[in-house]
Amino acid sequence: MKRMLLVVAALALATNAFAQAKQVKYVKFEAHNTAAWGILENETTIQELSGAPWLSTTKPTGRRTRVPDVKFLAPAEAKKVIAAGLNYKSHIGQASPAKYVGLFAKFPTSLSGHEADIPYPADATSLHYEAEICIVMGKRAQNITEAQVKDHIFGITACNDVSERAWQKQDLQWFRAKAHDGFGPMGRELVTNVDYRNLKLIGRHNGKVVQETTADLLIFNIDNIVSYTSRYITLEPGDVIFTGTPGTTQAMKPGDTFEVEVVGVTKVSNKVAAPKGGTTSAQQ
């Protein structure tokens, strides 16, 4: 009983710390053929920064850019992109949960930004959405405990773990099914000081809500995912972790849109684009 009270007290203190800290919305963008980081001051203005926001040397440049004039990029500087699979009971159905979180890899080239097209490969037949909560690391993490994770995460965003289901079944590994270029759209903003234990996640296919859950329903929570990953792989500032998708997913087709919202944090919305110069296998 005493131990339970201590755990409850610790969670309450953590929640209070998040509530007291000011949230900042960082964005990575391209303007005039140049990529930069900035702080989203409001819906019309970005304050440019001299570098990635987790760097101690980063400071405002004094320049401001209009939001309508930019292309949003994935808000990360990833050398590694790790993803958790089968991490909601609603996603695994009647199967028993694993004893430890199942991980796989995407690639930095898998990542894309808000409003970037999701490519539909010409030989794809079953391209699915997967709404997820995404984290970006702010400090180097090697074999850290769950209690240390909060101090190593820089920010939270939304993401879509786009997946080609036929390839998942056919291939030895999920190399092309999960890591294809553009199969990892990330939210417009990377938001700091977010209580990632208490988040609501929504996925919308062509405007219709098709996925909805809360972070407390993760089989392996974010602290566990990061700590476990760091036992085997050193995580660096800017690295990305996808945390798993809820429920069941459906196929998308060229022309469809999919939006992921982490309520009160950010959204990412993307349109599925047909391959250049031809139809998809699914359309034939």
Image: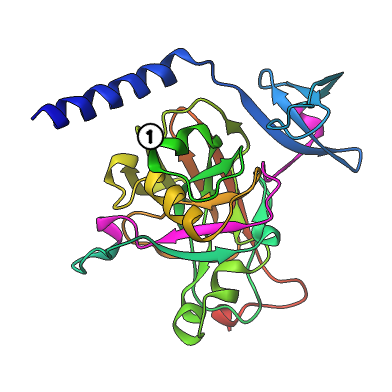
Q: Is residue 51 left or right of residue 6?
A: right
Regarding mark 1 in the picture, which secondary structure is present there? loop
Residue 64 at x, y = what percent?
Answer: 83, 20
Q: Quadrant of the C terminus?
A: bottom right
Residue 153 at x, y = what percent?
Answer: 53, 37
View extreme (right): residue: 32
Q: How is the image coloured?
A: rainbow
Q: Quadrant of the N terminus?
A: top left
Viewer-proximal residue, 186 or 202?
A: 186
At 50% from the left and 53% from the top, the residue drawn is 230
The residue indicated by pointer 1 is 199
> Residue 252: in sight, yes or no?
no
At 23% from the left and 30% from the top, the residue drawn is 7
Q: What is the magenta range?
A: 67-91
Residue 251 at x, y = what percent?
Answer: 46, 67
Viewer-proximal residue, 241 or 228?
A: 228
